[in-house]
Amino acid sequence: MVSAVLFDLDDMMLDRDASLLRFLHDQHDRLQPFLGHILQADYVKRFVELDAHGYVWKDVVYQKLIEEFRIQGVSAEALLEDYITRFHFHCVPVPHLMETVEHLKQHQFKLAVITNGFTGFQMRNIRALGIEHCFSEILVSEQVGRKKPDPGIFHHALDLLGVSPQESMYVGDHPINDVQASRQIGMIGVWKKSQHWSPPEHADFVIDDLAELKTLTQYMKLPDERRR
């Protein structure tokens, strides 16, 4: 019987693609003295390519942008600081985020977040989404000292919640870091379909929309012998 639901953040609760596009358009507009010689569409397109869906850190991205577009008057460090301190103003939630999380909380599921990234940056994004109060535990890899797919970060979260792997469900978009990693320690692995990743080799459940968790969790809350 499932009593805890754990979530990834980026592309799971945070619509990272939409958020990033909003931020990049704003950054280009605000920093016209330095970026105005670049067409906004070109700046945005190249950033997204270099970013690789968030798997390349932004100091590398900005340094390459400076070199390729011959940006002058502003450093990669300054652009990175702008990203770190202002991205959260542009956070866009995935559809049905708040209603789903509130539903799970009202039905007494223990809720937690496990996300890779830098603590301050990810916590600002979570707060911008307005969901921090819904989660008993929020684990960010920098603070924990381990990152997905390391099983240690999953075990640590479960210990904090006081639940076993068999009583818990992890929901994420990455086939290896989220689904495979959680299933390897005995959790129920749920894959939220992503245009960026191929389907995992094995997933216990696949969802298109976060709202599907409302039905799925009620089913998984039933004792094993009652599931048909």
Image (tube, rainbow, N blue to C red):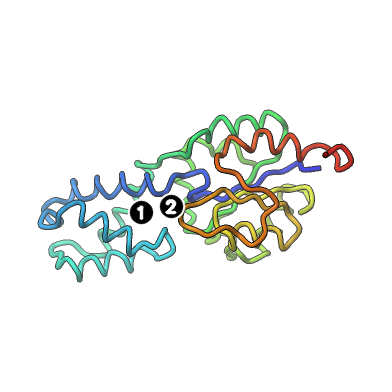
Location of residue 130 in the rendering, given as x and y in whole percent from the top left corner: 49, 35
Q: Is residue 153 above or below residue 124?
A: below
Q: Is residue 193 above or below residue 177?
A: above
Q: Three-letter amino acid code at disc 1?
A: Ile
Q: Mark 2: few, some, or many residues within 10 Å (few <14, many ≥20)?
A: some
Identify the mark nearer the N-term, 1 or 2: 1
**Drawn side of residue 224 relative to residue 140, left or right:** right
Q: Is residue 138 at all visible to an observer of this figure?
A: no
Give the residue drawn at x 72%, y 63%.
Answer: 184
Location of residue 57 in the rendering, given as x and y in whole percent from the top left corner: 39, 64
**Drawn side of residue 83 relative to residue 97, left or right:** left
Q: CA distance from mark 1 to mark 2?
A: 6 Å
Q: Return the residue at label 1.
A: 84
Observer-nearest of 63 and 48: 48
Q: Which mark is residue 121?
A: 2
Q: Is residue 154 at all visible to an observer of this figure?
A: yes
Give the residue drawn at x 59%, y 63%.
Answer: 176
Location of residue 209 in the rendering, given as x and y in whole percent from the top left corner: 55, 39
**Drawn side of residue 57 relative to residue 102, left or right:** left
Give the residue drawn at x 37%, y 44%.
Answer: 18
Location of residue 165 in the rendering, given as x and y in whole percent from the top left corner: 76, 54
Which quarter of the picture shows residue 153?
Answer: bottom right
Observer-nearest of 60 and 2: 2
Q: Three-letter amino acid code at disc 2?
A: Phe
Q: Mark 1: few, some, or many residues within 10 Å (few <14, many ≥20)?
A: some
Element marked by disc 1: helix
Q: Quadrant of the N terminus?
A: top right
Q: Is residue 160 above or below residue 181?
A: above
Determine whether label 1 and label 2 are within 8 Å by CB. Answer: yes
Give the residue drawn at x 70%, y 40%.
Answer: 110
